[in-house]
Amino acid sequence: MAILLPLLVAVLIGAGVYLVLSRALIRLIIGLSMIAYGANLSILLAGAGTAQDAPPLLNTQGPYNDPLPQALILTAIVIGFGTTALLLVLSVRAYQATRTDHVQELVERLDPLEAPDAYADPERPSVSPEVGPDVEGTR
């Protein structure tokens, strides 16, 4: 059991890094979640070996575990859940806008410097940053 949990941390983080290096957006989100879960498990393992004889300021017998790593992990789980939900909503919206989940295609389609005419409105006058908008009577 002593080698199983660190091995599980290594598998979670390794699989998460592999998925983050993938080019699909959903795999990227799942990989980030797996890395976060591996980090949470490693914090739990680091805090589990600190059992002491008695809690501070109490005269009870028996070992106890420090509750601080567990509180940190609980907070990290809640924050990770919120972050994952936000990333999933953003990825669904990006897929609806571009009809692709490939990360490189998303960058090419959404980057205004790469394709300036892709989202240009033909009825709106162009604004040049050097000259400014065409407004009569400003001089």
Image (cartoon, rainbow, N blue to C red):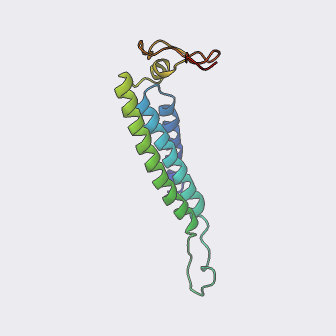
Whole-percent x and y of residue 80? 48, 49
Whole-percent x and y of residue 28? 46, 33
Q: Nearer the viewer, residue 82 or 58?
A: 82
Position of residue 110 relative to residue 87, above or below, is: above
Residue ranking furthest to the bottom: 59
The residue at 44%/14% (across/down) is 118
The residue at 47%/54% (across/down) is 77
Say which quadrant the C terminus sits in. Answer: top right
Q: Is residue 100 visible?
A: no
Label count reads 0
Whole-percent x and y of residue 72? 55, 60
Q: Nearer the viewer, residue 22 or 82?
A: 82
Q: Is residue 119 visible?
A: yes
The residue at 49%/52% (across/down) is 79
The residue at 40%/25% (across/down) is 101
Position of residue 21 relative to residue 45, above or below, is: above
Position of residue 63 relative to residue 41, above or below, is: below
Whole-percent x and y of residue 89? 38, 38
The answer to whether 85 appears left or right of 52 in the picture is: left
